[in-house]
Image (spheres, coloured by chain):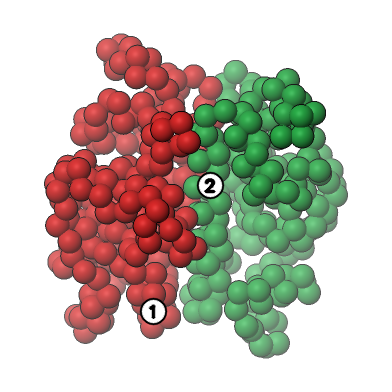
Chain colours: A red, B green
Amino acid sequence: MDRLREHIEEIISITDEEFARIKTFFTIKNVRKNQFLVHEGDEVKYEFLTLDGIYKVFYVDESGKEHIIQFAKKNWWMTDYIGFFSQKNATMFVECLQDGAVACLTLEGREKLATEFHKMEHFFRIKLTNGYIALQQRIILLLSSTPQQRYQEFSRLYPDLISHIPKKYVAEYLGVSRETLSRLYSNGK
Amino acid sequence: MDRLREHIEEIISITDEEFARIKTFFTIKNVRKNQFLVHEGDEVKYEFLTLDGIYKVFYVDESGKEHIIQFAKKNWWMTDYIGFFSQKNATMFVECLQDGAVACLTLEGREKLATEFHKMEHFFRIKLTNGYIALQQRIILLLSSTPQQRYQEFSRLYPDLISHIPKKYVAEYLGVSRETLSRLYSNGK
């Protein structure tokens, strides 16, 4: 729970008493490589704060092709947010790529926390603001016309992710073929 | 200002006294077709709540090609959010496509409103949540493999926009060629 408190205190200050209350809304879960936290078709019970490990959020289209919506590493929040916020069944998967642990929060817990503590409402607003910016950057990445530009932008935004993620997943995230991506890797571009 | 109050009260209840204070943070601006609210390279002073009219948020890549990030119509919020939240100069443009009016809010005003009223912090969090979901849907739209699937998904999400926006802008939003889009329009797909 120490890492959860550190994470929250990056944005707001909380007392021991407040944290004692806040932490009751979270459960900690250890996760192994290849384990699924969210599975398409199932209820989306939680959003997850990554305490450790690496994860991918993806969906599979009608033709069986996988598209990666998001990667997550320490201190990133993730889930199938379309399913989570609308309380509909998942249309995506969340899978662990590297052993780790997550803090799990329900939508009901999130709303209660935000109602009970103005500062937690603020915390979630700031996290959403950052998430909103990241998604806009992702859209620009997808609209950038050449695979090389997409790869350069991805490397600029997430230099510490590149070395931890298999090339094929980076290709699926950028919407380029694996062959094209391998050429860009070998050119160091 | 009545429309601003109606918009806020879709999510929270406010008293006359509270609204009298809240509205001091906003200025109303009438906008004409082809007028720019944000221009690449300039400071991003405001975010805008659309009271009337239609707008597009776009950026121009190095080759001079235009990419549309977002459309906006009544009750949607828009600006170059990357520039606005980071207080950096704009990398995008916001242009009016159909005469209207907007309510303008500075970042400082936004933060003060959220600090002063827990319920306004809640309002902004809920708007951001909806915006976050819309951006994720946009990413799925861009990753969907065929132009036909992108167009179908766009029509499903924004049926009332399709008839008000020139085809060439829809093509730029979907990242497909105008020729392909014209074929889809004429097939009614």
Q: In which quarter of the image is the C terminus of chain A?
A: top left
Up-down relation of residue B44 to residue A176 (above or below): below
Is residue B14 something that shows in the picture? yes
Q: Do labels 2 and 1 share a chain?
A: no
Q: Which residue is drawn at 73% across and 20% down?
A: B179
Q: Identify the element where label 2 is drawn.
A: helix
Relative side of A130 to B144, left or right: left
Q: How crowded is mark 1: few (under 14 residues within 10 Å), some or many (20 or more)?
A: some
x%, y% of residue B173?
64, 35
x%, y% of residue A177?
39, 19
Q: Which residue is drawn at 81% across and 39% down?
A: B34
Q: In which quarter of the image is residue B183?
A: top right
Q: Which of B80 and A61 is in front in this view?
A: A61
Q: Residues within 10 Å of mark 2 (few under 14, many from 20)?
A: some
Name the residue carrying label 1: A112
Up-down relation of residue A72 to residue B123 (above or below): above
Relative side of B118 to B18, left or right: left
Protein chain holding label 2? B
Q: Residue at x 30, y 43 (%)?
A: A56
x%, y% of residue B133?
51, 54
Up-down relation of residue B102 to residue B35 (above or below): below
Q: Which residue is drawn at 56% across and 63% down?
A: B127
Is residue A141 something that shows in the picture? no
